[in-house]
Image (cartoon, rainbow, N blue to C red):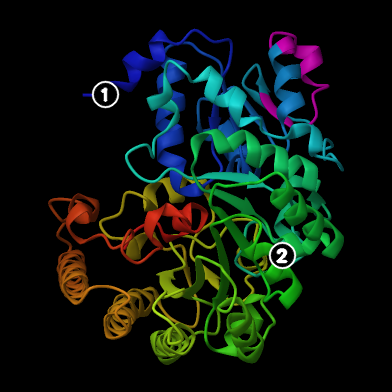
Amino acid sequence: KFNPEKRLRKIDADLFGIDFHWLVHANGVMRVSSILKEQEKNVLLGGLSSSYYHREIMELWDVDFVLRGDTTEPLIQLLLENKEDERKLGEIPNLSYRINGKTRVNPLSFVPGEIDEYYIDFKEVFKSALFRIKDYMPYRSKNFVGATLTMKGCEYNCISCGGSKFSYSLICNRKCPVLKSPEVILREIESFSILKAPIFLIGDLQIGGRKRWKRLFSLMREEGVEIPVIIEVFYPPGEEFLREASSCSPEVYIQISPESQDQEVRKFQGRGYSNNSLERFLKKASKLPFRRIDLYFMIGLAKQDFSSAMGIPKYAGRIMEEFNKKDDSKKVDCFLAPLAPYVDPGSLAFEKGVGYKILWKDLRRYCYALKQYSWKYSLNYEAKMSRDEIVRATYDGAELLIREKIKMNLIPEDSGIELIERIRKSKELMNEIDSLIEKGIEPEVPFSDFEPEISLKEELTPPSSLSIIRGLMRWRF
């Protein structure tokens, strides 16, 4: 049995850095940091959630430092060199820390306009992990996938996104996106290629303009990139982009998130393209040698009522039927998930209430919510639908989408029937929990204890882990 206290005690380091980027990791981060402090070790947190909640973290958790912002590499070095010098700590940009129990917050002034020098050399990462590779590869028993950040920041303002232009300005003081050059992106891809595993290019390459993406795809062909490549786009791209992208590797996947089939819902969410534009993209892309084209839809959007949510499986079914009928490749696939468990802190919805009613905002409540007896009680928002309706739409929509996939032979019938049965078990369990809570009776075991039996997070998201970033959004059913 793994013993975290024993493992951490064996590590000799001047400073322990913990990634607190995703808010769902709050309890784990808090627990690990408390173990380290019990062992009298220095603890540093970083990531978007740390950056947003830095004051509460310093007040509530026993950590020494928080480095805010989206680029902290040189600041960590400064901290390592000066962590015992109170005067010099006050000169480190983006740092939150304590002096005699009082929180100090330095200006968030380090926001580099160039990020090429902060590229990841995966060969060095793997070299350092050579003798402890299992510790560095938590997905080793599944299909491992890597990622390269092609940019930091964004030029779009999707209302529930914690990585939007508004959010980056608020949390990281970044007013506009900063782009990695094609040459550096290629360098990261090549350094990762030793694993022979897929790599995800995070960020819509269209944001950098035609010259940039054309240069990148050309370099990838010239250098003979052979590993699978996953490309995400925020808006339907044109034919030239698709043609260039589809040939940058022997195995290319492309992803887009229309969120809803309802154009008004999609537009309010921040994605202002029409269904006609989406379907023109699918028509072009399905004729090119992409391995798969993935579309992501969501339950719990602003302005989305139950009827609108139930229209997603029907629309997805029509798309899959229309664009997969030319051959047997089954190239176009659709996925559905709730916006769970949270509307992102720092987003327009969270800060301004745009389209959503946020039920709580403090970090302490988030830690509590993650321990609830079902995922419904972890949701931090309601929109046009209540939390009850969001849960019902999620389960009913998932069942309808599975039936559409069975009909088109996208999944085997026996597997689909098994999934539907698990959905029904999950609904029954949810109803039992609700009934007990209404009666003031505390359930004997948390919902998470049943997750291995009823969870659909693997079956309702793309196979072979090729959408790990999106998968993180899908949390649990």
Q: What is the quadrant of residue 169 in the picture?
A: bottom right
- Neighbour class for label 1 at 10 Å: few (<14), some, many (≥20)? few
- Neighbour class for label 2 at 10 Å: few (<14), some, many (≥20)? some
In the picture shown, does residue 95 fall above or below 212? above
Q: Residue at x 69, y 14 (%)?
A: 80
Horizontally, residue 195 falls left or right of residue 444, namely: right
Task: Give the structural element (helix, strand or loop) at label 1.
Answer: loop
Q: What is the quadrant of residue 177 in the picture?
A: bottom right
Q: Residue at x 39, y 35 (%)?
A: 138
User: Mark 2 touching mark 1, by CB under 8 A?
Assistant: no
Horizontally, residue 287 falls left or right of residue 393, namely: right
How far from the left and from the top, in percent, is residue 216?
Answer: 76, 52
In the picture shown, does residue 115 fall above or below 179? above
Q: 9 or 200: nearer the eye?
A: 200
Q: Label 2 sits on what residue type? A: Glu
Q: Which residues are magenta?
A: 81-97
Q: Label for residue 244?
A: 2
* Residue 33 can be seen in this image: yes
Q: Residue at x 79, y 24 (%)?
A: 92
Q: Residue at x 73, y 18 (%)?
A: 77
Residue 188 included in the magenta stretch of the image: no
Q: Label 1 sits on what residue type? A: Phe
How far from the left and from the top, in percent, is residue 110?
Answer: 83, 35
